[in-house]
Image (cartoon, rainbow, N blue to C red):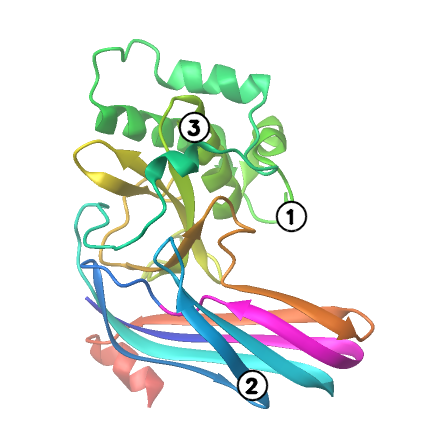
Amino acid sequence: MRLTVNHVTRYSFGAPIARLIQSQRLTPSRCANQQVQSWEVRMEGATRGAAFRDGAGDWTETVTVQGPRDHFEIVVEGTVETQDFAGVLQEHREKVPPSAYLTATDLTRPSQGLRELAGRALEGMGAATPLDRAHALSAMVSDTVQYVPGETDQLTPAAEVLEGGKGVCQDQTHVLITLAQLSGIPARYVTGYLFSAAEEHMSEASHAWAELHVPDLGWVGFDASNRCCPDDRYIRLNSGFDAQDAAPIRGVVSGGGGETLDVRVKIRDADDPAAAQAQQ
């Protein structure tokens, strides 16, 4: 599938800022699952600094904006050809060992409730394959945490998500990572895009899912929000220990009086005649 992306992020500041520094990971991953045909990140009045591929295989770029500025806009546009490998991440070069992703963060820290949930998910599966165990954990999250926007925020930890039983893809991913790590399975947070032709499909401005490390397969994606493994509808951007670590944009602002954020994302099938007409 060929997917086109139009992703606009606009920051509006309550008072003009003196300076803005950002670390951006807005370029799709290099792997066999996807090939970038075109990709551009545009920012008016920004100075691009150091750029490098980090140990997790993600492309990172630093950006500086000098004030005074009352707004800042980032426009990402491109086309990516994707393939369906049943969720298995293939030919993705990275240096961080899978064992590093057995480390919990403040957002994925275990609680007694999460320990009990992991036990229930794998009950009677002592002889099951590692892949089947991973699927069971993902299914348990789908069954336990209902997809409901507006019930959590960016800093809600997995333990609180489980107590409330509601959340969005970020929250379901944090719970799945915690269950996997409690079960001895390395797990990490992935940020990307998801194309959906169905209105009821569960996705947001950007999408998130987990990757669990399975022996003989490597990293395998699990999207608990949509009860599936990532296929050719998904574009992978980057990964991290949790949503904060895997955020495509992180920054520091000097001056200003607070900010508002507006994010708009459109994902289209480039080979769909209706989509092509809509872009004209």
In space, the residues marked 2 and 3 are separated at their CA atoms by 40 Å
- Point out the stretch of residues depicted in magenta: 8-27
Residue 202 is situated, as x and y percent measured from the top left of the image, at 42, 51
Query: Could you say where residue 52 lies in the image, as x and y percent from the top left?
Result: 41, 68
- Classify residue 91 as left or right of residue 39: left
Residue 227 locus on image (x, y percent): 33, 39
State the residue in front, 233 or 148.
233
Count of labels in the image: 3
Decide if residue 193 is on the left or right side of residue 131: right
Give the crowd class for mark 1: few <14, some 14-19, many >=20 residues within 10 Å.
few
User: Which residue position holds label 3?
Assistant: 181
Using the image, tell me which numbered label, if any, was put on residue 47: 2
Q: Position of residue 130 (x, y in %)?
A: 24, 25
Q: Residue at x 34, y 66 (%)?
A: 28
Q: In this rendering, is residue 202 above or below 253?
A: above
Q: Earlier in the sequence, mark 2 or mark 1?
A: 2
Is residue 15 part of the magenta span, yes or no?
Answer: yes
Please, what secondary structure does the residue beneath circle 2 have? strand
